[in-house]
Amino acid sequence: MLTPIEQKILETQSLEEATAALEHLLSGGYSVTPDGQIYYIRQLVAQVKGLRIEIFSREHPPPHFHVSGGGIDATFSIADCSLQEGKIGGRERALIEWWFERSRPILVSAWNATRPSDCPVGPITL
């Protein structure tokens, strides 16, 4: 059975909705167990304001997305969510990876929609 946050993420239709769901995870006191289960822990509640997930139109390989705000400034691969650069806490990284597993199609769609014809990195196929 899906938790309400899992259901919400699965129902997102845009990068903006997916970003709002990730902001909720990061600021709402959630964490991820080693076996991939999401759970709520009040002692880690912190407010995250201005969280941004960005994909730029003229990018270098490999395809990636940027997460910034709330003390996070990191770049992740769209292929596997590996950290490309930046520093991020273990809790926040686990939440981003959990969110990524459920939101990757939206990131791929956003990446593909922002590729200009002369972009050195083309579209992604799933």
Image (tube, helix red, strand yellow):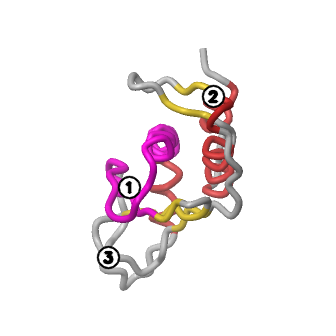
| Dot label at residue 60 | 3
Vertical comparison of 112 with 100: above or below: below
Residue that numbered label 2 is attached to: 41
Vertical comparison of 33 with 96: above or below: above
- Lateral position of residue 99 relative to residue 15, left or right: left
Label 3: which secondary element = loop
Viewer-closest of 107 and 46: 46
Name the amino acid type tagged 1. Answer: Ile
Vertical comparison of 1 with 87: above or below: above
Residue that numbered label 1 is attached to: 78
Label 1: which secondary element = loop
- Lateral position of residue 66 relative to residue 79, left or right: right
Residue 60 appears in which quarter of the rendering? bottom left
- Residue 101: give x, y in percent of width and height: 45, 39
Residue extending farthest front: 43
- Lateral position of residue 54 relative to residue 34, left or right: right
How far apart marks 1 and 2 lie (CA) works out to: 28 Å
Viewer-closest of 65 and 49: 49
Name the amino acid type tagged 3. Answer: His
- Residue 79: give x, y in percent of width and height: 32, 52
Label 2: which secondary element = loop
Image depth: mark 3 or mark 2 in front? 2
Specify start and end residues of the magenta stretch as a single range: 74-103
Q: Going from the N terminus, do you reach mark 1 or mark 3 first?
A: 3
Image depth: mark 1 or mark 2 in front? 2
Quadrant, the N terminus: top right
Viewer-closest of 117 and 5: 5
Q: Residue at x 52, y 60 (%)?
A: 72
Q: Residue at x 60, y 63 (%)?
A: 69
